[in-house]
Image (cartoon, rainbow, N blue to C red):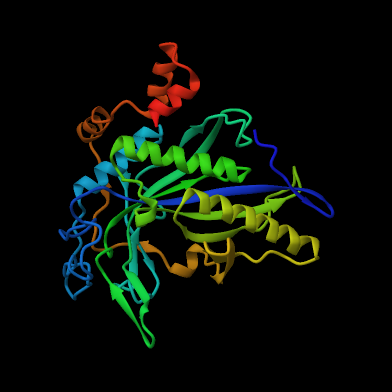
Amino acid sequence: MSDYRIKGETGEWEVVIGLEVHAQVTSNAKLFSGAATAFGAEPNTQVSLVDAAMPGMLPVPNRECIRQAVRTGMAIDAQINKWSRFDRKNYFYADLPQGYQISQLYHPLVGEGSLTIEADEKAGIAADKVIGIERIHVEQDAGKLMHDQHPTMSFVDLNRSGVALMEIVSKPDMRSPAEAGAYVRKLRAILRYVGSCDGNMEEGSMRADVNVSVRKPGDEFGTRTETKNVNSVRFVMQTIEYEAKRQVEVLEAGGTVDQETRLFNPDTGTTRTMRSKEDAHDYRYFPDPDLLPLELDDAFLAECRESLPELPDAKRARYLGLGISAYNADVLTA
């Protein structure tokens, strides 16, 4: 366990952290179209009529994207749901031509799982700790807006629109920036071993939404904020440190923490308000009428399981069993 605490004028505060990691699925085509997914292509050169939401275009699920998400779920010993369903999450944004995102809210592909972060005395992690994972659902990414190309207008690149994402939602089990950093590194290692995501955070193919709240030890959970699209392990840790201290200052001054979405500024190491936090009902979710539920058979699941490589925990244990030191085992596993 970590003994990380924020010291305030009224005593010590505990930090409660949950992460929603968006991992871009490794596949040659998008989730519902045949358009390419290569990083760095010229803007708007990898856009099908489906991605551009032309009238009458119908989505068709990409089997490989589903397979990669299932394999990822198996790698964290998660419940694989043989029956799952896609929902429409309705919101308007300039880089989302449909006016809704196809996601999974009520019946995700992957249910509960977990991963273990190893003890690290230098980082302040006193013992191995199991971090619960609530779900992995599959959804399509939005495009990208660029605001710095011209002083009076913005540009949209739809190359990323429709690319398959796995949203990996942790439970609020982390209690320090070090634990959150270790969790992201461990999750990235598993994704790379499995081959379901390249884990390149600097390219945006893996990014984290950081949920932070504070409380007096033993109290009920406090109100959380969500800082969106943090794209490095160091920035995840900086976000937590800043947000926890900011919330403690607000509470000790007699204020209340607003449930809101925030953005992290890597140049200053601070966060700022982006918008008030929406709840599920604000998005008016409903089952996507263009897509049948996903039904997975035993043969498909068996193929997914047989395709998995030796995973980091098993490899590390094997090296330790051969008499290799813990440090060398960690280096070899990484």
Quadrant where the C terminus sits is top left
The quarter of the picture where residue 283 lies is bottom left
Indicate whether 222 appears above or below 99: above
Residue drawn at (59%, 48%) of the image: 17
Residue 256 picture location, percent across and down:
73, 65
Q: Which of the pair 34/43 is nearer the observer?
A: 43
Residue drawn at (33%, 73%) of the image: 95
Does 241 sit left or right of 79 as displayed?
A: right
Does 235 sit left or right of 61 as displayed?
A: right
Residue 11 picture location, percent across and down:
82, 49
Indicate whether 183 appears above or below 204: above
The quarter of the picture where residue 213 lies is bottom right
Does 34 sit left or right of 81 as displayed?
A: left
Residue drawn at (69%, 56%) of the image: 245
Q: How many marks?
A: 0
Residue drawn at (31%, 78%) of the image: 155
Q: Which of the pair 331/211 is nearer the observer?
A: 331
Q: Which of the pair 4/58 is nearer the observer?
A: 4
- Is residue 203 something that shows in the picture? yes
Quadrant where the N terminus sits is top right
- Is residue 82 something that shows in the picture? no
Residue 165 picture location, percent across and down:
33, 53
The quarter of the picture where residue 315 lies is top left
